[in-house]
Image: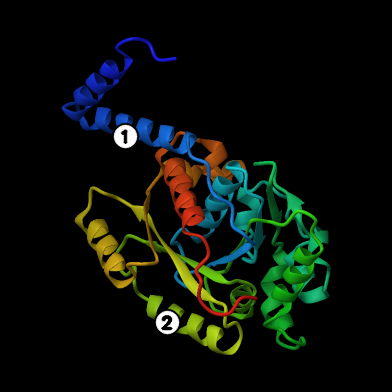
Amino acid sequence: MKHPGEDQHSSNSASVFDGATPLAREIADLTRRRQAIASERLPKPEKTRVMTISNQKGGVGKTTTAVNIAAALARQGARVLVIDLDPQGNASTALGVDHRADTASVYDVIVNDLPLGDAVQKSPEFGALYCVPATIHLAGAEIELVSLVAREQRLRRALDLYMQGLEEPFDYVFIDCPPSLGLLTINAFVAAREVLIPIQCEYYALEGLSQLLKNIELIEKHLNPDLSVSTILLTMYDSRTNLANQVAQDVRDHFPKQVLKTLIPRSVRVSEAPSYGQSVISYDLNSAGSLSYLEAAAEIAHRGAPQTGSQR
């Protein structure tokens, strides 16, 4: 129940912050954003959305984005599966799941035909967050896949078979790719309907992007007609620099429909979280980086899957 004068007090506080120091304005802004997120209920998709997170350029926040968007959606009640297809296994580490060499992993699924369900682990992060880990064996999978039948389709077939047998389907599946275009990444593109591309707000941000888009177009044409670039997320944003603002504007000009409004700032908390085996969502929920990923996840949920291509 509101006390008399509470609304007046809130407006007075806002007006005080408007003329206050940058720090006070930042605190007020974070408070407002926290309240907005806390009161929001995200819509669930009508059917599972399978998204590959990819950028051939390294160091753009690809794995960080995969883990934190997944954690943000799981925190809001969605059932989420992360498939770690990067031999470095960073997504597995950040989600706190075991990925030692002898662990059942995505390598066993795509190379040895292990049922995907046998490699799924529950993340300690949130009740509805799961992960298929990557182990060191995945480093040699590119070579081993070359001689296998239907080598580009192996992840898709395993995922389709797994999801058909689920009593309670996943709302989202996120596939984290290595920063290269080999057979692992091609498997990820063939298994997905959507591509999420993180782009850092730095010089050379658009370098290599045209090649990535051409590769996605080729895969759409020859292997997966349902695939489309649905989402672009701007990461490592520093509002203090003209360069970051210019890069953000350039990307928005090129891809007005795909770019999310939310910008992911440079954040110490986001960088620290994986070393504790956590996403930033559980490591420091109230940090600016965490709030930004929660907002980006909400945008993705509200946008829904793109209605392009045939339905699988």
Residue at disc 2, secondary structure: helix
Q: Residue 166: x, y in percent?
A: 79, 59
Q: CA distance from mark 2 to mark 1?
A: 38 Å
User: Is residue 108 left or right of 152 when viewed as pictured?
Assistant: right
Say whether residue 270 is visible. Answer: yes
Q: How many marks?
A: 2
Which amino acid, mark 1? Asp
The residue depicted at 60 percent of the width and 82 percent of the height is 224
Q: Residues within 10 Å of mark 1 (few under 14, many from 20)?
A: some
The residue lying toward the viewer, choosing from 299 and 62, is: 299
Height in image: 285 above or below 68?
Answer: above
User: Which dot marks residue 29?
Assistant: 1
Quarter-wise, where is residue 172 in the image? bottom right
Say whether residue 208 is visible. Answer: no
User: Is residue 273 left or right of 140 when viewed as pictured?
Assistant: left
The residue depicted at 48 percent of the width and 34 percent of the height is 38
Q: Residue 294: x, y in percent?
A: 48, 45
Height in image: 141 above or below 258?
Answer: below
Image quadrant for the C terminus?
bottom right
Q: Which residue is mark 2?
A: 211
Residue at disc 1, secondary structure: helix
Q: From this viewpoint, which residue is outermost toward the top?
A: 4
Front label number (2 vs 1):
1
User: Is residue 65 left or right of 235 when viewed as pictured?
Assistant: right
Q: Are marks 2 and 1 in contact (CB under 8 Å)?
A: no
User: Which dot marks residue 252?
Assistant: none
Q: Residue 219: x, y in percent?
A: 55, 84
Label 2 or label 1, whichever comes before in sequence order: 1
For the rendered model, the colour scheme is rainbow
The residue lying toward the viewer, choosing from 5 and 239, is: 5
